[in-house]
Image (cartoon, rainbow, N blue to C red):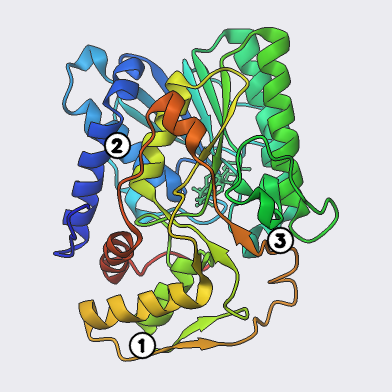
Amino acid sequence: MARIVHEGATSVVQDDLTRIVDGASPALARLAGSRLLITGGAGFLGYYLVQSVLRWNRSVPRSDRVRLRVLDNFARGLPSWIASLPSGDALELIRHDITRPLPAGADADYIIHAASIASPTYYRRRPIETIDANVGGLRALLDHARASGIEGLLFMSTSEVYGDPPPEHIPTPETYRGNVSFTGPRACYDESKRFGETLCVNFASQYGLPITIARPFNNYGPGLKLTDRRVIADFARDVLAGRDVTIFSSGTPTRTFCYVSDAVVGYLDILTRGRPGEAYNIGIDEPEISMFDLAQKMVVHAADLFGYDGRAVRSSSPDADYLVDNPSRRRPDITKARVELGYDPQIQLDDGLRRTLVWYREHQDGADA
Ligand SMILES: NC(=O)c1ccc[n+]([C@@H]2O[C@H](COP(=O)([O-])OP(=O)(O)OC[C@H]3O[C@@H](n4cnc5c(N)ncnc54)[C@H](O)[C@@H]3O)[C@@H](O)[C@H]2O)c1
């Protein structure tokens, strides 16, 4: 069981970075001296992907440093953490929309394509941009990788490629083909990720390129901005505003929640050691918890940490499409990543929620965009 940390946001982040750099040390050693391009690196997962590489860089000789380039159009705002990172030969931050032709200097040995609006509230507002990032933007990167050569390209797909699996496919393995609407309000995201995977698999097989796919299942933790409108950020926002924690459903849908530091180790392992053309579930397999029980946990931890005295309540969202095609259960089978990559998530939900609440208390900034 991991240590419960709640002294302050800085200690949470430093502890998480230590865990990532330790857990991903074989992957980071493979990246030594290479050029790594992260698209969408200003987003939630970018928060630890970028900072863990920079942390590792500080511990190795200059010649081993990873030359990191982050490409992002800041569609969801320019976060203060990335704006204040020291720029230099180890980090280059480029404002660029991945749906536009690639800028000069996009050459890289490794690429993580994470540029895509990921929050359902926001991708439903910008469906075409979402499709373009996952299909056209990905295609541009694949063509570039083919032309200039690549050591590894990781496409950040999603557990949403499975849609709403029936009970016999839960926990869901990579072999499950999905139950997905191709015209509903979430289709811009789900279907563009599915077609993105098709592109990756075929570029890997036809051109022999080392292209891999991650399917993240509900990651959460520091770096996910309070206004993101994914569920844990929403609950934390309620807590910090001193109002009741509001569940915009019956409270019965279930999920497993994977703390971000565990997930990031998985992504770096897939990038450097995943089998070409293969997809890997990255998440945690238990506990599978209902939204109501999750809200209750937030209430209990917030009461303990901050003296919060609200409660969990059910309501309906003002957004009519909020629950349309929302999966009723989501739980990954992570055997493939465990067996092939040694992936082994460590942070249990209660510990992760406390870390997250502590981080949010000190990070309530971030435009509602
Ligand atoms: N976090 C999760 O639990 C989760 C789950 C499933 C899939 N994913 C996938 O992982 C990736 C990263 O997720 P996240 O949670 O960090 O998302 P995020 O929304 O926090 O960050 C995405 C970043 O991509 C950028 N972006 C969006 N469109 C862009 C474009 N056209 N050009 C350049 N930059 C663009 C945004 O500005 C943002 O900084 C996404 O592809 C997402 O679909 C994440």
What residue lies at 53% left-to-right and 12% top-to-bottom?
A: 150
What residue lies at 45% left-to-right and 67% top-to-bottom?
A: 232
What residue lies at 31% left-to-right and 91% top-to-bottom?
A: 309
Q: In this rendering, is residue 274 above or below 122?
A: above
Q: Is residue 21 visible?
A: yes
Pointer 1 local density, CA inside 10 Å: few below 14, some 14–19, many at least 20: few
Left or right of 111? Residue 98 is right
Q: Which residue is mark 2?
A: 52
User: Is 33 in front, or is 171?
Assistant: 171
Sequence-first disc among 1 and 2: 2
Q: Position of residue 34 (x, y in %)?
A: 37, 15
Left or right of 338? Residue 124 is right
Q: Which residue is mark 1?
A: 242
Q: CA distance from mark 1 to mark 2?
A: 33 Å
Local SS, label 1: loop
Local SS, label 2: helix
Pointer 2 local density, CA inside 10 Å: few below 14, some 14–19, many at least 20: many
Q: State whether label 2 is within 8 Å of ligand 1.
A: no
Left or right of 324? Residue 4 is left
Left or right of 66? Residue 216 is right
Q: Amino acid at mark 1?
A: Gly
Q: Which residue is mark 3?
A: 124
Q: Position of residue 2 (x, y in %)?
A: 21, 52
Sequence-first disc among 1 and 3: 3
User: Is 342 in front, or is 127?
Assistant: 342
Q: Position of residue 64 (x, y in %)?
A: 25, 15
The image quarter containing residue 196 is top right
Q: CA distance from mark 1 to mark 3?
A: 28 Å
Q: CA distance from mark 2 to mark 3?
A: 31 Å
